[in-house]
Image (cartoon, rainbow, N blue to C red):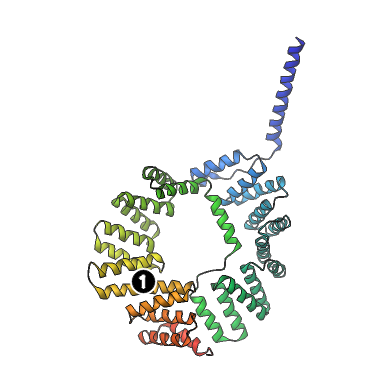
Amino acid sequence: MRREISLTLVVIAIECIVFGYLYYQKAFQPTPPQPNLAVVDSFTEEDLNFFRDTTKEPEDWHWLGQAYMAAGYYAEAKATFARAAELMPLSPWVAFDNGFCLSRVGQVVEGNAEFQRAIDLGHPKAADAMYFIGRNHLRNEDPENAEIAFRKAVKIPLAKFELAKILYRRGELDEAETLLTEVVRAEKGTVQTFVLRSQIELKRGDVPGAEKQSIEADSKWVRIKSPFGEQRKRLMENNSKFGFYLKAKEAMAKVAQHENRVARTKVKEVLEQEFDLMVHDSFIKLDIFVGRVKEALELIEERIERFGPSSSILLTLGDVRKMRGDDELALEAWKQGIDINSDKSARDCCKRVADFYGGQLADKQKSLLYQAIGAELYAKEGILLEEFELANKQASLAVKYNPDSAEAFYLLGRSELGLGMTDAAAKSFSRCLELEPTHGRSLLCLKTLKGTPK
């Protein structure tokens, strides 16, 4: 009897301990914040709820904070990172992510403290953290401390550029220009460097020099690589690990693997949740691959109705119309694609039109005209990327195929200018102006060349 009583008491004691532990866990251990998931798709809602419900270990808190931030729930991410920092006070990764999140919600002082903690704990991206500290000081209208931070992060080209801007505003033009030269060496030509160089030349009173830099800036779209861009990429990568974007990635993988039935089901499931351009592209490719041409056309028309035409979608529209035997309509789509952009899709539209005229219609003159337009588009991209030899080769072809094109001669001149062939560039710009006297960019380039010592 005593044994049975003792055994019962032991069982009761164990139950009390277990119950007490569970009560403590529930009552005193903080639970992750619950975001408003009514505004997201069901895939994301399901995964975020699962992450929240299974968050127990310190690493779980860190991941949940990253997931919340990737999904755009910054307030909830901030609270989650704060708990992760309590649980993992020696983690430089948690400190860095906490600093980034705090900065995104405008708490720049607190963000800087966390970035500094990440640096002190040995984060491998210490220079990035210091760059963010500098940017936060600028947001706080504190250029003195921003300068100190950027000098510590000077191995990052964008930090060097920000430092150059501070020096320019202070009138220290020589050091600012030296820093810009170093940025150009690291990053090639970018729109920010040429704009700032133009401003420096104006401040010195060198108007021709400023105009020359403005010409360079006019043809640039590339920007200096940013640590923020790296963090944005991380957010996108995290976003693809759960919810809608994970389902989208899986659907597109099935399309690429030609698992057509499974792919079709998965693609439709994703598009029912949200209209995603990349998944929609995959659906069009899938329909074309399996011969559903009519459905592919309907998808393309839906895309154009929603987002308007682009060179890419018009290239595909032309190809699908060609598959149906609608040659004239295909030609119409490709021609429209040429006028919208200067990217690879636009150049491919040019090739389609040139081949169409050169082959089926046996119109050599029109074929050469569209080959010239394609070469012009290619030359423009070469100039943007400062690949002047490529641009020169393509512009030379454009001039050869269409010697009456003012734009072709302008592009030839710009490529020659980029290669340092100033005499040849002047002749090309002059020929452009003979064909089109009001071509402003050639006028500006010639004016600059006249003020440039040989």
- Provide the secondary structure element on which disc 1 rests: helix
Q: Residue at x 63, y 54 (%)?
A: 101
Residue 310 visible, this orientation: no
Q: Is residue 16 left or right of residue 416?
A: right
Q: Position of residue 401 (x, y in %)?
A: 32, 78
Residue that mark 1 sits on = 374
Q: Position of residue 143 (x, y in %)?
A: 69, 70
Q: Residue at x 66, y 81 (%)?
A: 174
Relative to 444, residue 367 above or below: above
Quarter location, residue 309: bottom left
Q: Residue at x 70, y 38 (%)?
A: 29
Residue 166 visible, this orientation: yes
Count up the numbered dots.
1
Q: Residue at x 63, y 78 (%)?
A: 177
Quarter location, residue 337: bottom left
Q: Residue furthest top?
A: 1
Quarter location, residue 110: bottom right
Q: Position of residue 251 (x, y in %)?
A: 43, 47
* Number of other residues with Cα within 10 Å of mark 1, as a class: few under 14, some 14 to 19, many 20 or more: many
Q: Position of residue 207 (x, y in %)?
A: 56, 86
Q: Nearer the viewer, residue 228 or 72?
A: 228
**Which residue type carries mark 1?**
Gly
Q: Residue furthest left?
A: 361
Locate the N terminus by quadrant: top right
